[in-house]
Amino acid sequence: MILDGKIAANFFSESLSKEVAEFERVHKLKPHLAALMVGKSGPSETYVAAKMEACKKIGFQSSLFRFEESISEEELLGEIEKLNSDPSIHGFIVQLPLPSHISVDRIIESVKPEKDVDGFHPINLGKMAKGQPAFASATPWGIIKLLKYYNIDTEGKHVVVLGRSQIVGLPMSLLLSRNSNPGNATVTICHSKTKNIKDLAIQADILVAALGIPEFVTSDFVKQGAVVIDVGISRIKDETKKSGFRLVGDVDYMNVAPKCAAITPVPGGVGPMTIIALMENTLMAAKNQMNRN
Ligand code: GUN
């Protein structure tokens, strides 16, 4: 079975649209998401454009603030402060990666947790780890929604997560091991220092590949009948394409797919669900801010 993120995202966007329309009817304004973007990188341009497009489709107001690659950390912190204190913006994201002269941690920690709809702030990560209401990191939260949509049972399953990043691998492992549904899985996290990754991966009932290494997961990593979630998305050279590249995930899809009970394609798997999770977080942020005022 193909876990089609576009179909699932369409389903969730319909119910979100209704909720957003109701929000607008009650509050006489739309939930408002802003994105900050530093420099110009092809992939970030594509992701941010998709986020802005989703806002339009679902009925959110959106704003995009662009800055030169040369912006200083202090200047960027100043821009974040403006959005933190602007009551017309309910949630915002700083698109990553950032240029190397800017500390990602400092930037993430400067976003007001109530507006941190990417769920990257330590307060949100910590609350999520404790099972308290919080904005969960958009990609893992989107994967949870995808598993739910396709009725993939995780209880008691062995999940192997490849990658321990703060924005995917770590929150993914927390969400799948906590006492909820989806959740209640036994989770193994693998990373660059793990010995025998293949021996661990092949034990997985559900394998989440989030390493950022194109086509790293080959068929000998995957147990027959496993569920494979591919978080990777990389551009690799392809002279046969007009653009000169094609998109591939962390999984060697052609060879792995025949072994799987279910697998996400790239593109069109996890990506659209990340956007839905971001929209859901933004609506939640807007509702919370309205209730407080
Ligand atoms: N870069 C890659 N994925 C993400 C994401 O989910 N949010 C942000 N802000 N930047 C990213």
Image: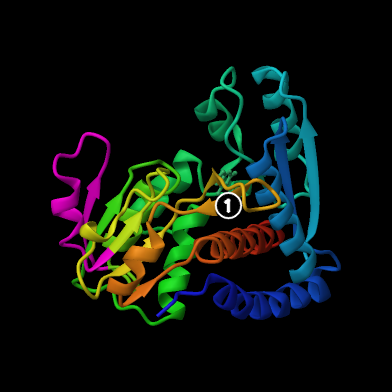
Image spot of residue 203 (x, y percent) = 15, 62
| Residue picked out by circle 1 | 246
Quadrant housing residue 95: top right
| Residue in front for this viewpoint, 115 or 248 | 248
The 10 Å Cα crowd at callout 1, few under 14, some 14 to 19, many 20 or more, is some
Residue at 44% x, 76% y: name it. 2
Image spot of residue 3 (x, y percent) = 45, 74
Q: Is residue 187 magenta?
A: yes
Tell me the quadrant of the picture where the C terminus can be found. Answer: bottom right
Q: Is residue 214 above or below residue 59?
A: above
**Ligand 1, image quadrant it occupies:** top right
Residue at 44% x, 64% y: name it. 143
Q: Secondary structure at mark 1?
A: strand
Image spot of residue 169 (x, y percent) = 36, 48
Q: Does residue 103 appear to the left or right of 95 in the view shown? A: left
Quadrant housing residue 65: top right
Whether residue 242 can be seen here: yes
Q: Residue furthest right?
A: 28
Q: Which residues are magenta?
A: 184-206
Give the amino acid at mark 1.
Arg
Q: Is residue 45 magenta?
A: no
